[in-house]
Image (spheres, grey):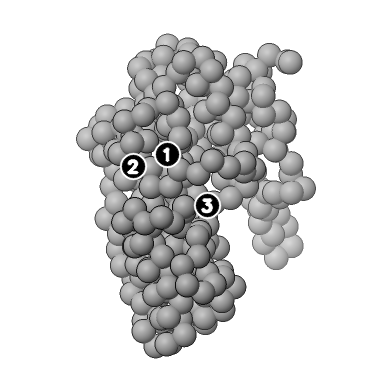
């Protein structure tokens, strides 16, 4: 394996970075139900003071043809080129508490070398604990709090917060590998997989970003601003509820999800939120079809607002 340290360029001297901080990580790639990670990343970098510590080599890690960068064409010439970025930042929360933030694209290539590079930085900076967030679509209702599956070696967080603990095989992410390698060397780590309503998986669901922030806060004690996200969430949910109330079929489907969710949370014999009660589980397509007009309207509204 080539030297993992050659995968990133330092933007500031590591000796100037405080040691013993929490590392918060969120990378977009394989799945990001509800836009939880992308919203989290954007929100933290927009709302908090951040300084770039290191930037990873996109030419070595990224498949440009699968995730093409954005370029701007202005009438007859090109004006802007925006390649994807994966960086480690030094950030301060609302109270000024410093922490590290690893954010950007999930690498397409060289996962072992990349994970070695991250573990090298974790060691050099004497990271207190690595906390990462991921989100997957699940047949759960938007009318209930977003649940979470917790992994890692912080048993107190698993016991207190993990609502679904399956034994299963699933497609891995780069952060899964990093968590696995951190556990092998005895480093503290915890992963939060948010269980997002499957019919909202392709939207930017503000509640998913809020849930990500709340779980990170629970694991670290860091304090983050959420007022903007909560306002967006109130508007988003009010529009969904309006659509549900106006459509008896959609109301029945959401009600079935609520019944299944509540029964599971009350420690019934159900094995997971995916288990059938009476009748078939409403599919993502069934609910998505009913919400199509709402989502199309929302997208048009966003575009009209941007045009004004």
For image coordinates 48% across by 25% down, the residue present is: 53
59 with respect to 30 (left or right): right
Q: Position of residue 158 (x, y in %)?
A: 37, 36
Q: Nearer the viewer, mark 2 or mark 3?
A: 2
Question: Where does label 2 land, which residue?
Answer: 161
Give 119 or 61, whichever is nearer the viewer.
119
Q: Residue at x 45, y 18 (%)?
A: 187
Q: Residues within 10 Å of mark 3 (few under 14, many from 20)?
A: some
Image vertical order of residue 74 relative to residue 282, above or below:
above
Q: Which residue is mark 3?
A: 136
Disc 1 packing (10 Å; few <14; some 14–19; many ≥20): many
Q: Earlier in the sequence, mark 1 or mark 3?
A: 3
Q: Is residue 54 left or right of residue 92?
A: right
Pick whichever, 257 or 297, lies toward us: 257
Q: Residue 14 placed where, x, y %?
A: 46, 15
Q: Which of the two discs, 1 and 3, sits closer to the camera?
A: 1
Mark 2–mark 3 Cα distance, whole angstroms, equals 17 Å
The secondary structure type at the circle numbered 2 is helix
Which residue sits furthest right? 65
């Amino acid at each position: 394996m080539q030297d993992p340290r050659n995968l990133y360029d330092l933007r500031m001297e590591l000796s100037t970075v405080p040691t013993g901080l929490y590392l918060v990580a969120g990378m977009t790639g394989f799945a990001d139900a509800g836009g939880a990670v992308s919203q989290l990343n954007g929100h933290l970098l927009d709302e908090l003071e951040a300084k770039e510590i290191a930037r990873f080599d996109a030419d070595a890690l990224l498949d440009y043809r699968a995730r093409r960068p954005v370029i701007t064409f202005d009438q007859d010439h090109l004006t802007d080129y925006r390649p994807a970025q994966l960086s480690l930042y030094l950030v301060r929360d609302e109270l000024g508490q410093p922490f590290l933030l690893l954010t950007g694209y999930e690498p397409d290539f060289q996962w072992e070398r990349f994970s070695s590079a991250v573990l090298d930085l974790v060691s050099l900076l004497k990271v207190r604990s690595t906390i990462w967030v991921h989100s997957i679509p699940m047949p759960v209702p938007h009318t209930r709090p977003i649940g979470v599956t917790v992994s890692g070696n912080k048993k107190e967080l698993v016991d207190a917060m993990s609502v679904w603990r399956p034994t299963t095989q699933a497609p891995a992410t780069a952060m899964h590998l990093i968590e696995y390698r951190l556990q092998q060397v005895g480093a503290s780590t915890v992963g939060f997989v948010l269980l997002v309503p499957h019919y909202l998986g392709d939207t930017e669901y503000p509640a998913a970003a809020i849930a990500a922030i709340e779980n990170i806060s629970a694991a670290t004690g860091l304090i983050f601003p959420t007022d903007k996200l909560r306002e967006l969430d109130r508007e988003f949910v009010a529009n969904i509820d309006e659509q549900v109330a106006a459509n008896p079929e959609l109301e029945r489907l959401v009600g079935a999800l609520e019944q299944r969710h509540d029964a599971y949370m009350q420690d019934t014999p159900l094995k997971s939120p995916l288990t059938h009660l009476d009748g078939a589980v409403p599919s993502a397509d069934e609910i998505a079809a009913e919400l199509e007009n709402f989502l199309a309207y929302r997208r048009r509204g966003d575009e009209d607002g941007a045009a004004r």
